[in-house]
Amino acid sequence: MHQALVDLYYGFGVALQPHNLMWSFFGVLVGNLIGVLPGMGALSAISILLPLTYTMHAVPAFLMLAGIFYGSMYGGAIGAILLNLPSHPPHAVTCLDGYPMTRQGKGGTALGITMIASFFAASFGIMVMIFASPLLVKAALKFGPTEIFSIMLLGLLAGGTMARGSPIKGVAMTVVGLLIGVVGTDVNSGTIRFAFGFPELSDRVELVALALGLFGAADFLRSVNRLEFIGTETHVRLRDMRPSMAELKQSFFPMLRGTLVGTLFGAMPGTGPTITTFIAYALERRVSKTPQRFGHGALEGVASPEAASHSKTQVDFIPTMSLGIPGDAVMALLLGALMIQGIAPGPQLITDHADLFWGLIASFWIGNILLVILNVPLIGVWLKVLRVPYRMMFPCAMFFIAVGVYSTNNSLFEVNEVLVFGIVGAILMALDFPLAPILLGYVLGPLVEENFRRALLLSRGNLGVFFQRPISLAFMVLCILLVVLQMFFAVRAARRKRRPMRSEPAPAVGATVPATND
Amino acid sequence: MRLIPSKRSRDYLGGILMIAVGLAAAIGGWSYRMGTLSRMGPGFFPTSLGVILALAGLAIAITARFTRYEGEIEQLAPEWRGWICICASIVAFVVLGKYGGLLPATFAIVFISALGDRENNVLTAALLAIACAIVALVVFRWALQLQFPLFQWG
């Protein structure tokens, strides 16, 4: 406990260095800007700017990327509340009550509450991170390849089955991602696998090209000429954003409940952010004395999911950094960025790269404060950005994608990869497959293979080893439980279909959800 | 025109696609050395993944047979103009990047993809493309020193 505070103090020292602070600020600003743009979420924001970090030192690079992440999350909430346009799927649920509030002229209050809820939840998440990480590290140091494989399997299964849509489809996409991760040179034997004769592919598929193909180009292919632009004539002034005491009181407990939901889901590897916000919303409706207000501008319906998504984001960094198991696609992307920097995620990370870890934690706080400070005067600018029509936005985004991907290796081959993954992604989306598990599988693929091979080498080919070591057994039991529960729910849902049942509100009525990926 | 007629056929198609990809991966993986469980060759992991994917595809297709679907699929008209323009714009960027340089490539990708939207005309697309070319020049070439010649032949 005491040690954690000392480390945190050290972290603030790192994060407050002018150089690092500048990159953190830059990240938050750009992330916020891109997040506000319709159809652009955290994934595209991080991928476009990822090549820029290849030449940077690891600490400022990661501080910037994290800043982009929560900046774009907050930016997404602005679009959801003011335009009914969820640019990032977790915000779909914020639209349900946020947009009605805007139509009642209370858009400013909704934004203010969102800001307070985010800050509150993020702070809570950071606290959990500070005190839970060292404990987790102690446990994780006992992990060998067997345990790492089992926990990764659990993460992949959870990531595949708990995303939106059909669990089997999610699993299929995870496997597709693992297969894309196989492309390249096998580290053990030097064999080049699935390169189809392209020498460029011997060095793996480019992470940025994959992410921007699946979440950028594919999205444009899907939304072109289909995304209806809803103009906004909302004027939000500074003083509109300050909620009254009564509104603060009304949203305090929803905020707290949302934060707890987010923390719980953040600690579970593989649960997507969308499902977290939807559960927070559903919980709020259930405990509310007046559930009929939901969907018509209930403040609780904005506060709780936004708090959940922010606390989940923070807590998600724990399994990502200390175990190397990303909670969702964005975390997978950040993990990939970490590995590109030559930093292996895992229990050693906190001790080996203390400056990075504690600096990052401190920067979360600084970043969240920056976000609040930025958004108060810039809300007018964001409103103008929101009016940028899609027909102007996506061609420019195409250009940024192409140049960004080119700059990863100064080669045009990777730009072709964007085209391929864009088309593949659009087809898979049309067939109702979730795309986020692909990225998860791709990033974890080499680690999974490596640990699987090593575990079986150590056990001399005995597959039972995964069930013999106690920690591994626990993860395997969780895996089996997860699959059995999913099957149980699927069968029950199929039986219930006979009588029409509708307890959940349909997400974002009237709005085209640009990205169907989790 | 309907590209995908119903929810059920969409799941059938998805299942068949996964079976095909899985089998292809398994066959491709088989051509590398398999090795034994204790000393796996490079072919072991992709082959197993291929088999798992094919099985998942089979499961998708089979469950589609027994699922009761509610409502119909949201019918969206195929958007050939947008699709072709977006794909062509990336191809144009690659080709012009190689045989023209950064500025022509930038102009091409923005101009062609902008034409994919029905509300853009040649003039707005060209203006947008010029604006992006200026960004490419100032931000990427001058400020970030991107290694991409502005103009080049061949």
Image (spheres, coloured by chain):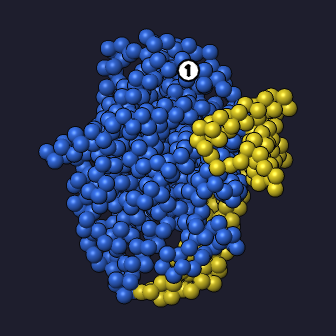
- Furthest residue in direction left, as rendered: A2
**x and y percent of residue A380 in the render?**
54, 17
The front one of B97 and B145 is: B145
- Compare residues A7 and A230 and report the one nearer the observer: A7
Q: Nearer the viewer, residue A306 or B111?
A: B111
Q: Residue type at mark 1?
A: Val
Residue A507 lies in quadrant: top right
Number of on-image labels: 1
Name the chain letter of the residue that bears numbered label 1.
A
Q: Secondary structure at mark 1?
A: helix
Q: Position of residue A24 (x, y in %)?
A: 42, 37
Circle 1 Cα neighbour tier, 10 Å, few/some/many (<14 / 14–19 / ≥20): few
In the rendered image, the vertical position of residue A354 relative to residue A255, given as above or below: below
The correct choice, above or below, for A231 with respect to A157 in the image is: above
Asked if residue A268 can be seen in this view, the reply is yes
Residue at the spot of label 1: A381
Picture coordinates of residue A479 (x, y %)?
Answer: 39, 65
Query: Which shade of the palette goes to chain B?
Result: yellow
- Note whether residue B55 is visible: no
Q: Is residue B79 left or right of residue A363?
A: right
| Rendered view: A92 above or below A58 | above
> Residue at 60% across / 76% down in the picture?
A192
Colour of chain A, in one word, is: blue
Rendered location of residue A138, percent (x, y): 22, 60
Describe residue A56's horizontal placement relative to residue B5 as left or right: left
> Which residue is rendered at x = 32% and y = 76% of the image?
A467
> Which residue is pictured at 55% across the width and 20% down the height?
A381
Q: Quadrant of residue A139?
A: bottom left
Image position of A173 (left or right of A265):
right
Q: Say if A512 sits above or below A196 in the image.
A: above
Residue depicted at 69% across the width and 42% down the height:
A399
